[in-house]
Amino acid sequence: MLIIIDENTDEIRLDIYLSQLYVDISRSKIQASIKSGKVLVNGEIKKPSYILKFGDRIEFENLAPVEILKVEPENLPLEIVWEDENMAVVNKPSGMLTHPTTLENSNTLVNALLYKYGENLSDINGEFRRGIIHRLDRNTSGLLMIAKNNQTHEYLAQMIKNHDLTKKYRAVLKGDYQKDEDIIEEAIGRHKTQPHKMTVTPDGKPSKTILKVLERFGEATYVELTLVTGRTHQIRVHTSYKKHPVYNDTLYGAGMGKIKTDEQVLQSYYLKFAKPDSSQIIELEIEPDEKLSKVLKFFRNRRIN
């Protein structure tokens, strides 16, 4: 398998990264595989503690049984918002994994993409991530770009790295956010003791989120968030740091509110980018999803009553 590290997965130890991919294989076994040369980074054997960098190429033998790694096409609901011969933009629903893991290799976006497009997907990042350039958390819905070939994958990955696109989110935050507009610039890095989480830390990567209040409910605030950078969990970390975590985001301290949902009430609703090999600008926007609409209706009704 071959995986090229993007900006959302760099600055993490090699053994921890593979442990997150192979969640059902012990870390000691993964470390042994790295030390024995079954895992190469940029063609070289590295220590398990090696810190991955953007653009690193990880090549490794299958560390799990072949049947676990096999990703089957599945006829799952798939909303195509826009597409051409080189790429597509899909609306991923909340609750769906973007790509498989060794514990879950069905009912993901990649399974649906394989059914829709077959071999017409980029394979730079291996079978688990066919066509995938960037990701959304399982319980975050919204717009995702998909590459149909490797050339387009590289173009879009570079565009994301250079921040040459506009990506906006809608969210409901816990509590009353005091500023109508805010710019959150706090470095984000991986949590030292909980590697599945990110945190604000002085030795993290520069991160910037622009926040604009859309509607106030007293006990919650409806906001628009523009990502200037695209760190893992960036919105969730930045809003939690400001003591106003995304509503129902239990991982980052919100707890479960009065109106129950599947975790964070967060949607990637707007995308603007230059079409590959063209000067044409593509601008896409979708309506609030079912989860966001449910929470907004709840708070609006409480305010009226």
Image (cartoon, helix red, strand yellow):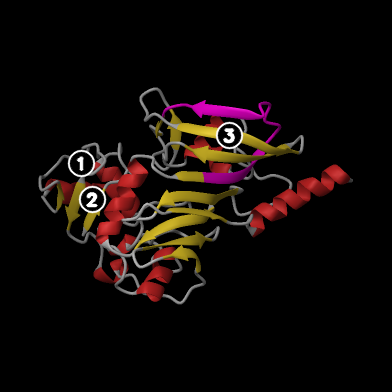
Judging depth in this view, the residue of 134 and 22 nearest the camera is 134
Q: Residues within 10 Å of mark 3 (few under 14, many from 20)?
A: many
How far separated are the C-alphas under marks 2 and 3? 41 Å
User: What residue is disc 1 on?
Assistant: 48
Q: Earlier in the sequence, mark 2 or mark 3?
A: 2
Region rendered in magenta:
168-187
Q: Is residue 125 visible?
A: no
What kind of residue is marked 1? Answer: Pro
**Residue 267 percent coordinates (x, y):** 57, 50
Magenta segment includes 21: no
Q: Which mark is residue 211?
A: 3
Image quadrant where residue 242 sits: top right
What kind of residue is marked 3? Answer: Leu
For residue 56, above or below residue 178: below
Judging depth in this view, the residue of 25 and 207 nearest the camera is 207
User: What residue is disc 2 on?
Assistant: 30
Kindly check if marks 1 and 2 are in contact, taking CB atoms under 8 A apart as contact. yes
